[in-house]
Image (tube, rainbow, N blue to C red):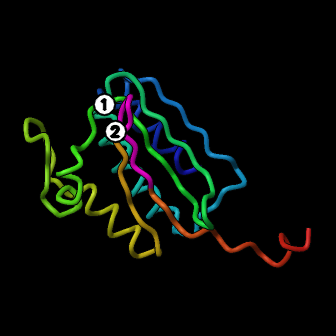
Amino acid sequence: MVAGRVVRVMKRTPDGKRLNWWVEIPTTIAARIDSEDLAEALGNLVENAARHAKMRVAISGSIEADMVTVSVTDDGPGIPPERQEEMLGRGARLDTSGPGAGLGLAVVTDIADAWGGTLSFERLETGFRVDLRLPPARRSARARRK
């Protein structure tokens, strides 16, 4: 499971060590995307969440409206609504106090676009959520017969 691998790596970083992690993606959910592209996209989203979270990061998966949705939620401040579109561009950064080139969300957007997906944000009462939506994987003929 790609999300589990990404979280295991993040737990070894200073930001990741201080956080509580929760991953809930049913094994029956599969998106039509190369696993390395998915790992890169999730890695960027999870790294951002870990950098800004207070105490927790959650990764969940679901199928909604014929799309697979992978959500990364944290309890940090999130991106102000008026800056969300700007943050999708290369070099855009909210926090310039630490390292980073402002490429993460632009890379995730490029990956989502390449696979027919989208990226969206939602400010929550208790944090921030980023949704990566991708087309579902095609089921094999054998799986459809079962």
Farthest left residue in view: 97
| Residue type (three-letter) at the residue carrying disc 1 | Gly
Q: Is residue 104 left or right of residue 143?
A: left
Q: Which secondary structure class fits the magenta region best?
A: strand
Q: Residue at x 33, y 42 (%)?
A: 47
Reading the image, the residue beneath label 2 is 49
Crowding at dot 2, Cα within 10 Å, few <14 / some 14-19 / many 20+, comes out as many
List x then y, in percent, for residue 33. Answer: 53, 68
Say if 122 sits above or below 142 in the image: above
Q: Which residue is mark 1?
A: 76
Q: Residue at x 16, y 53 (%)?
A: 102
As drawn, 60 above or below 77: below
Whole-percent x and y of residue 35? 52, 62
Contact between marks 1 and 2 (CB within 8 A): the answer is yes
Q: Residue at 64% across / 61% down in the picture?
A: 30
Q: Nearer the viewer, residue 35 or 120?
A: 120
Mark 1 surroundings: few (<14), some (14-19) or many (≥20) residues within 10 A: many
The span shown in magenta is: 124-131
